[in-house]
Image: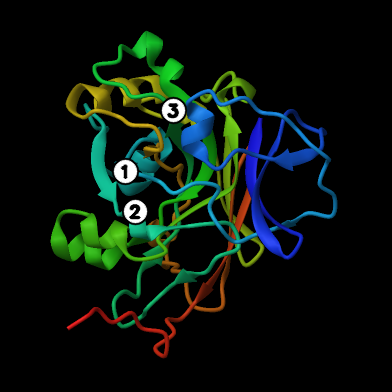
Amino acid sequence: MRLGTFHVGGGESLLYQAEPGAPWCTASPGLAELTGGAPMTCGAPVDDLEPAPRLPFRPRTIFGIGLNYHDTVAEMGWQTPEVPYLFPKLSSSAIGDGEAVVVDTTLSTRVDWETELAVIIGRRARHVPAEKALDVVFGYTVANDISARDLQAEDGQWVRGKGLDTFCPLGPVVVTADEVPDPQALGVRTWVNGEQVQDGSTADMIFDVRALIAYLSSFFTLEPGDVILTGTPAGCGDFRTPRLALRPGDRLESEVEGIGRLVNPVVAPDRTNQVVGAT
């Protein structure tokens, strides 16, 4: 089953597709109902769909995993990690397909791309053994772990560099786990302004999806709606010679085989649309 947000009848609706090629139908209110086993019934099929720039769900906790591809570690010249390298992404960084990645060059001039397979947790889980780890997965989507490399280098830890607003595009749809029998056999690709810059495979992960869930659940309780970003293959801009970085006006495309292609424009901040708290 696939979940997506579309413009329907002048508004936005969460729709689902029971199987590839089937009509898109109105879904239940959200991920919580689906992961709780709510029955899915399709009314009249919906035609002439236009994707809406909104997430099919709101992530709860976003766990990022760094240095998780053999070719990435080789590209960077780092040692292969003995345990997963874990960092948080703030929920406020999440945006959907078609929404803009905001690059503020007064904050960072080394904004990089990292297309990744994202795992969506569907059941509350703690101390899950690796052999049962996929049982707690609701589904998968495409992510781009946008990273401000200069902020990462300044801080030593990665909260600022990974957590800026709009730095976690997710989408374009959520594909349920039954449609992805082997999450370690998926192509992972990126294009910037039409030029392909990443072309890897989840088979190259150092720690596979099962191992990541087992590791995380040994420390934290995983909840429905939590998202795990599983790392990115080689081809990031900051490790090229010369370096490449995302700039306002760029077009970023992120693809995971069998799920879809996530497309996000890159824009400068809108200084006229600031959020000001109450005094």
Marks 3 and 2, the one that precedes in the sequence? 2
Residue 55 seen by the camera: yes
Question: First in sequence: mark 1 or mark 3?
Answer: 1
Q: Residue at x 16, y 65 (%)?
A: 154
Distance from the alpha carbon under mark 1 to that under mark 3: 13 Å
Give the residue drawn at x 36%, y 40%: 74
Residues at circles 1 and 2 in contact by the CB criterion of under 8 Å: yes
Q: Which residue is mark 2?
A: 91
Q: Give the residue at mark 3.
A: 122
Asked which secondary structure carries label 2, the reply is helix
Compared to residue 191, the image places residue 57 above or below, namely: above
Count of numbered tags: 3
Q: Nearer the viewer, residue 228 or 112?
A: 228
Compared to residue 189, the image places residue 10 above or below, namely below
User: What amino acid type is highlighted by mark number 1?
Assistant: Thr
Q: Tell me the crowding category of disc 2: few under 14, some 14 to 19, or many 20 or more residues within 10 angstroms, Cα based.
A: many
Which residue type does callout 3 highlight? Gly
User: Is the Cβ of the residue at disc 1 closer than 8 Å to that at disc 3?
Assistant: no
Q: Nearer the viewer, residue 161 or 112?
A: 161
What residue sits right under mark 1 in the picture?
61
Q: Residues within 10 Å of mark 3 (few under 14, many from 20)?
A: many
